[in-house]
Image: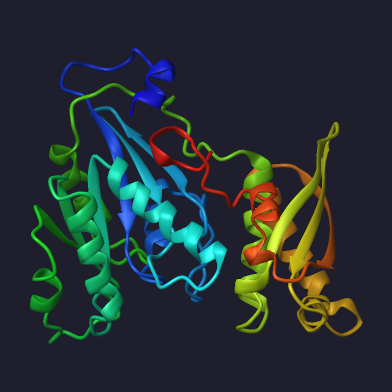
Amino acid sequence: MDELDSIFSDDWSEDHRSGLVAVVGRPNVGKSTLINAILGQKIAIVSSKPQTTRQRQLGIYTRDDAQFLFVDTPGIHDPRTRLGDYMVKVAQNALHDADVILWILDVSGALREEDTVIADAIKRAAANTPKALVLNKIDLAGEDCDRRDHLALIKHDLVFETSARNGAGLPNLIDGLIPLLPLGPRYYPSHQVSESNLRFLAAEIIREKIVELTSDEIPYAVAVEISRFSEKKDINIIDAIVYVERESQKGIVIGKRGKMIKRIGSDARADLERLLERHVHLQTRVKVLKNWRSNEQFMKRVGYFLGKGKKGQPG
């Protein structure tokens, strides 16, 4: 946590607790949904399609006695591209840095091989770090759901049952995690909920709409770059470039007579106006960049690059 020491607030007592909480799990178990629900607003995009989260995102939740720095991580999976390698490294580095590990497990279905892989990764990277299991999606699990297999995956300090979708169990989760946090100061102002800048959030919102509205192959082949973000008197002007890997994918994103890209832009603009609390003029273009997921120079330009930042975070 030394990289934050220079910016913390003096407004804290001797028994105040704070720390990094790494939220980990396989793709599509509800990590981003849970963090958004705790914060009461969206800082991470959400989709039913796996591997939506690509970058480390910090969600800041503050109360009088504690400040949680929730690190939303990409789902740990078997990578097949340089982008996949990056995503898995981001998640693994979060394990090394964490003061507490919050492992999200989906109890609406059976365990998968990926869950065992994650258990092994946690044991290697953070054997002595406090761990809490969150049995999520309890609203979708049957009354006869057997949790014993989930609980046996790894030695843990606490167990919580939640539904990130409807908020069930979240107050108990927050109260229960506080004793696992180390004593420490308030690192961010109490009103701040994210360290992500507005350009990043704008790109993520646009990408979320593409993931939601297009066919299965598109989410993994799309990147969004904000080429212009300017604030006028009563409006924000945002220009975005949507990159795909093939001409056929470009056709899907644009849609017949441009209907799909218009809908993407309309839905994204609505979310951006709620985020920015002002009018937004959004213009999107679609370009083809073949095999960009294996192009390190491009990935670095759009923010997918694991450099030599402090404590292994993206630099």
Image height check: is 210 above or below 190?
below
Extreme-top residue of the structure: 10
Residue 184 in percent (x, y) is at 24, 24
Extreme-right residue of the structure: 257
Asked whether, in this view, residue 239 is left or right of residue 173, the answer is: right
Residue 211 in percent (x, y) is at 62, 72
Query: Residue at horizontal 83%, vertical 67%?
Result: 286
Image height check: is 127 above or below 313?
below
Give the quarter of the figure containing the N terminus.
top left
Specify whether residue 187 is in view. Answer: no
Residue 121 in percent (x, y) is at 25, 61
Specify whether residue 229 is in view. Answer: yes
Q: Image quarter for residue 91?
A: bottom left
Q: Image quarter for residue 249?
A: bottom right
Asked whether, in this view, residue 281 is left or right of residue 112, the answer is: right
Query: Residue at horizontal 53%, vertical 42%?
Result: 307
